[in-house]
């Protein structure tokens, strides 16, 4: 009787181990495959919509210096879950293109890079703060720690291209919300420049801390003028 009980217990443990292994495989690999396909489809849909949309009405020319940021063409906050921009990072490869969706909930981060509600929109004065997974669900920020000072992070919207340049990195706790303040790390200060803040869990496979990359707006240009030179160069 005892031997039989031990045998049953052993079988249950083996079964549990197999289930855990299958869950890990699903979490680490299957979610990547499904999310990458969905995100690529979202990028294609955005580009097709932008290419077929009526030409935008004339607007003031965009400055090219971070001291005087461009007026963003995304003037209103999109509905939660909607994709409204595409992020390109030459350091991550020429085929890297990930949609930016409104919101940073679990569902939104499955669909791409999430935009922190209430922070600036692309190109706007303040802090365009975004979040992405380092593992699972397409892991758009898997290589975030490889970014170097001066690397380009390019954000495309319906009307414009925005080129940000990486300035510095930080590792913080989840409670340090000052990273997404209008002036990063300086809550309460009035912004005069345009920043982009990338956030991801740290260390890898853990949510104990956050890995932060700050980038500053360098330039912007109309989509009609074609992709910026920064999109083709690393560093």
Image (cartoon, rainbow, N blue to C red):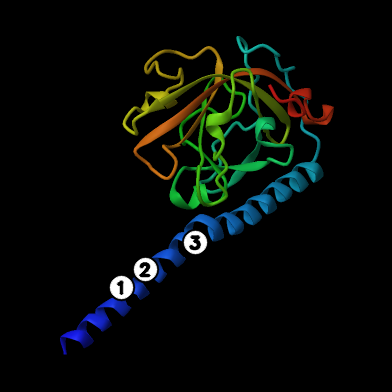
The residue mark sitting in front, 2 or 3, is 2
Q: CA distance from mark 1 to mark 3?
A: 18 Å
Q: Quadrant of the N terminus?
A: bottom left
Vertical position of residue 52 compared to residue 228: above or below: below
Relative to the observer, which residue lies in front, 25 or 74?
25
- Asked which secondary structure carries label 1, the reply is helix
Image mark for residue 13: 1
Residue drawn at point x = 53 percent, y = 52 percent: 137
Residue drawn at point x = 43 percent, y = 64 percent: 21
Density class for disc 2 (Cα within 10 Å; few <14, some 14-19, many ≥20) is: few
Image mark for residue 17: 2
Answer whether labels 1 and 2 touch (C-beta < 8 Å): yes
- Residue at numbered disc 3: 25
Q: CA distance from mark 2 to mark 3?
A: 12 Å
Return the x and y of residue 53 as percentages of the image width and height.
78, 43
Residue 122 relative to residue 186: left or right: right
The residue mark sitting in front, 1 or 3, is 1
Density class for disc 1 (Cα within 10 Å; few <14, some 14-19, many ≥20) is: few
């Amino acid at each position: 009787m005892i031997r039989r009980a031990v045998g049953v217990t052993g079988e249950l443990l083996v079964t549990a181990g197999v289930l855990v292994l299958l869950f890990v495989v699903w979490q680490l690999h299957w979610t990547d495959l499904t999310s990458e396909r969905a995100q690529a489809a979202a990028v294609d849909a955005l580009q097709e919509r932008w290419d077929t949309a009526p030409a935008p009405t004339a607007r003031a020319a965009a400055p090219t210096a971070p001291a005087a940021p461009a007026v963003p063409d995304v003037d209103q906050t999109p509905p939660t879950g909607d994709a409204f921009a595409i992020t390109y990072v030459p350091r991550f490869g020429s085929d890297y293109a990930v949609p930016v969706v409104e919101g940073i909930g679990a569902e939104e981060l499955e669909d791409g890079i999430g935009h922190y509600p209430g922070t600036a929109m692309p190109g706007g004065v303040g802090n365009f703060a975004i979040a992405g997974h380092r593992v699972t669900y397409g892991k758009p920020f898997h290589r975030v720690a490889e970014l170097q000072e001066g690397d380009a992070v390019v954000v495309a919207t319906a009307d414009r291209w925005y080129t940000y340049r990486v300035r510095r990195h930080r590792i913080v706790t989840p409670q340090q919300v000052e990273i997404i303040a209008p002036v990063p790390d300086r809550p309460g200060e009035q912004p005069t420049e345009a920043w982009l803040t990338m956030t991801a869990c740290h260390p890898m496979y853990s949510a104990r801390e956050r890995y932060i990359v700050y980038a500053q707006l360098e330039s912007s240009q109309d989509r009609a003028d074609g992709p910026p030179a920064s999109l083709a160069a690393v560093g």
